[in-house]
Amino acid sequence: MSRELSLFIVASLAMGMAYSIIDATFNNFLNERFALSGFERSILEIPRELPGLLVVFASALLWFLCSRRLAVVAMLLGAAGTILIGFASPTYVVMVLWLFIYSLGQHIFIPLSSAIGMELAEEGKTGQRLGQLNAIRNLAAIFGSFLVFIGFKYLGFTFGHTFALAAVAFMIAALLMFVMKPEQTQPPALHLKLHREYRLFYILSVLYGSRKQLFLTFAPWVLVTVFHQPTQTIATLLMIGGIIGIVFQPLLGWATDRLGERIVLMCESVLLVFVCLGYGFARFLVSENTAFLIACGCFLVDQMLMSVNMARSMYMKKIALQPSHVQPALTMSVSIDHVFSIMVALLGGLIWNRLGFQYVFLLGTFIALGNLLAALQVRVPKSGPASAAFTPEPMQGD
């Protein structure tokens, strides 16, 4: 394999470990340190998701950095935010400021992950390459979650330990991406432009961001506050999801290459309807223990379905009018979907407080049905103008 792909793989391992460690501990950290209510937890999504709204402007301001150098900035912001959250958060307000920094790095990298992965893919094997890279991140998630589980259960870890380990992993990822060969940059005006031809892609991104926000915000919160689960439980679920993903992610990429984005997006929507209903209403239909197991199963299935976002990125690549549109359009979609995801987080918090957590996931069911209607409209040209113009770096041994 090429030098650039090798570096990106190892950087993805380090970055995946860092995000997994944070994901496994952050909700318990909030619960133990600040004792937030469901609505207060949803309010926290405003500063956490605001960087997603601003990411298109950040990318335009840093237009002189290519995607690989911009990824370095994203990892450094992640490292700084992680350290500050873990060691310099005497009050809730101060923690929110550091969370904004961490989240800015995270959101800058979201579109870059797919853009860099597609640059390193052979023609006709984009899904396979993205699936392989996602599988590598799942492997990293296993390591990170296992480390959290062992650390808290047997080694006397505190939240300070986990935040420090995550920051080190972010720094390693930044260094590896810094030594990757830089590619061509895009002018700032291209980052700030909406294209009418991509409107269905933007709609799909809004629906994905909205439903993702419900699960990122409220699914772990249900396990922590409704089922009263400790840090080890979230870490264990993330670890199991990572193990499943090692096999599932490449299969998903292969299926997207063979069956097409439309079929994959439709299947995701149908499965998500059952996931939302199971997560929200199992507790009222079966015993507490059985409901907990169903919630865990839905949590894992949703982890897998998050990866279907690769199909949206591939769809964008195939319909792009020019190759230079792909990465800016992916970044623009992140900003657009965060306008709605912030609103969904606030609405979910209000619904939780007034009606109960189950109706939050009923809202997710309606979003999934909307996603199904949008997926039915997907039409991909056999040979898009942009996909043919991509010239991936030479590599061996797929």
Image (tube, helix red, strand yellow):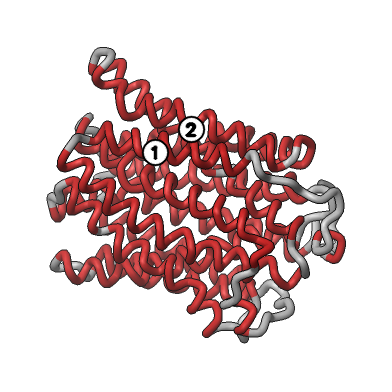
Which quadrant: the N terminus? bottom right
**Taking the image as drawn, is residue 154 in sight?**
no
Task: Name the residue at 65% across, 36% down.
Answer: 264
Which numbered disc flags the more N-terminal residue, 1 or 2?
2
Which of the two residues, 192 or 177, is positioned nearer the viewer here? 192
In the rendered structure, the answer to whether residue 30 lies left or right of residue 292 reads: left
Q: Mark 1: which amino acid?
A: Gly
Residue 178 falls in image quadrant: bottom right
> Measuring 79% from the left and 37% from the top, which residue is drawn there?
258
Q: Position of residue 100 (x, y in %)?
A: 33, 69
Q: Residue at x 30, y 56 (%)?
A: 161
Residue carrying label 1: 364
Question: Label 2's element?
Answer: helix
Residues under numbered marks 1 and 2 in contact, where contact means CB atoms less than 8 Å apart: yes
Residue visible at 53% across and 37% down in the picture: 304
**Relative depth, front residue between 42 and 21:** 42
Residue 295 in the image, given as x and y percentages of width and height = 35, 27
Q: Of the numbered discs in the image, which one, if any, rests on residue 272?
A: 2
Q: Quadrant of residue 352?
A: top left
Identify which amino acid the numbered label 2 is placed on: Leu
Q: Is residue 136 left or right of residue 335?
A: right
Q: Is residue 385 above or below residue 208?
A: below
